[in-house]
Image (tube, helix red, strand yellow):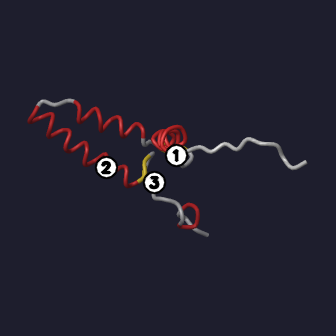
Amino acid sequence: MYIYPDNLKSKAILWLWQLRDIGVIGVGLLLSVFALAQLKLLPPIVITALYAFLTIRFDDTSILDFIKYACAFFITKQQTYEWGYGKQ
């Protein structure tokens, strides 16, 4: 019996984020606070908060993943359609 989910095959998750996302959010928050304190810039903290919101995971998917898949489907990947009659 394993305590870690999916027999050590799933990614590590802490609270609602993957550990990689928590690292990115932490570094972004640190840089955002420095930018806000020294340069009086608000956009970095808004971008960090938006990234934190978009990477919240429910059932192993996030809003950011959905947006990536939608962009790939509608914009970046070519769709092929084959028209014709079946064998008769």
Say if 38 sits above or below 17 in the image. above
Q: CA distance from mark 2 to mark 1?
A: 28 Å
Say if 73 sits above or below 18 in the image. above
At label 1, the amino acid type is: Lys
With 70 as the anchor, is 24 left or right in this view? left
Q: Nearer the viewer, residue 32 or 66?
A: 66
Q: Residues within 10 Å of mark 2 (few under 14, many from 20)?
A: some
- Asked whether the residues under the numbered discs 3 and 2 touch, taking CB atoms below 8 Å apart as contact, a structural biologist would say no
Mark closer to the chain start, 3 or 2 = 3
At label 3, the amino acid type is: Ile
- Asked whether the residues under the numbered discs 3 and 1 touch, taking CB atoms below 8 Å apart as contact, a structural biologist would say no
Q: Could you say which disc has been placed on residue 77 in the image?
A: 1
Instruction: Give the mark toward the camera: 3 or 1.
Output: 1
Instruction: Give the mark toward the camera: 3 or 2.
Output: 2
Q: Could you say which disc has been placed on residue 24 in the image?
A: 2
| Residue at which label 3 appears | 13
For the point 19% across and 43% down, the residue is 31
